[in-house]
Amino acid sequence: MKIPEYVLVRSDRRTLAVQVGPDGITVRSPRRTPQREIDRFVFSHLDWINKKLSQIPVSSHAEPFSRAELDALRDEASKWFPEAVGRLAPLVGASVAAVKVRPMLSRWGSCKSDGTLCFNTLLVLLPENVRESVVLHELCHRFYMDHSPRFHALLKSVCPDYPALRRVLLKEGAALTQRLRNTRRSG
């Protein structure tokens, strides 16, 4: 199993904690906790996280996607993401083996060590600069397969607005993932 995407909040606390809500997963950590330890903590709580995600109430405002809508999103994403990766990879200096798209509930993107990038089809419903920030995030993982300070320094060098764009992604994306969750529950 893979670790789901989460928002990391570092503070002067003494222990690790994870919260799950309609807006996604938040991990709270002491300032100096290594990223490996945080990821291990999240991984050790995956069953609980998945249980909590499944208990999030179905929103009456989040209409399920139709099969036609999901097909159209896949078609658009299958065109947009390979083009964007080709355009943005030189900015990072990254090589990519393949680009895949699929609807996902807990991730916006992923990077495999073999160079395969995968993107959530729901991203095509978000502003282009938000999509590009996710592409840049995954391209930076071609050099650092973690969320270390080195990773974040590289990401900041190619996408200085990443923190603001991530907030937009999490805020607007929550409704999209809820629609997908409702689609899977209804079908």
Image (cartoon, helix red, strand yellow):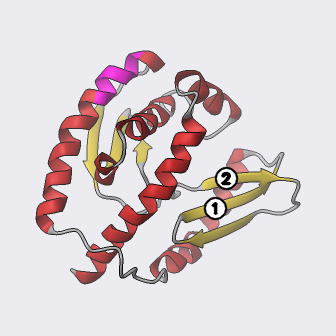
Q: On the picture, is 86 further left or further right than 22?
A: left
Badge 1: few (under 14), some or many (20 or more) residues near its Cα, within 10 Å? some
Q: What residue did someone put label 1 on? A: 26
Amino acid carrying label 2: it is Leu
Where 135 sits versus 68, above or below?
above
Q: Secondary structure at mark 1?
A: strand
Is 77 colored magenta in this rendering? no
Image height check: is 63 above or below 173?
below
User: Three-letter amino acid code at disc 1?
Assistant: Thr
* Most foreground residue, 144 or 156: 156
* Label disc, if present, on residue 67 of the rendered structure: none
Location of residue 3 in the rendering, given as x and y in whole percent from the top left corner: 53, 57
| Farthest left residue in view | 68
Residue 21 against residue 118 in the figure, above or below: below
Residue 139 in view:
yes
Assign the magenta stretch its main secondary structure: helix
Stretch in magenta = 84-90
Task: State the residue at coordinates (18%, 37%).
Answer: 79
Residue at image x 65%, y 69%?
Answer: 19
Give the position of the C terminus as an image quadrant.
bottom left
- Vertical position of residue 59 compared to residue 9: above or below: below
Which residue corresponds to mark 2?
8
Label 2's element?
strand
Foreground: 21 or 85?
21
Q: Is residue 145 visible from the viewing direction of this image?
A: no
Image marks 1 and 2: residues in contact by CB distance under 8 Å: yes
Q: Residue 74: x and y, percent?
A: 19, 51
For the point 23% across and 44% down, which residue is it? 77
Residue 14, quarter of picture: bottom right
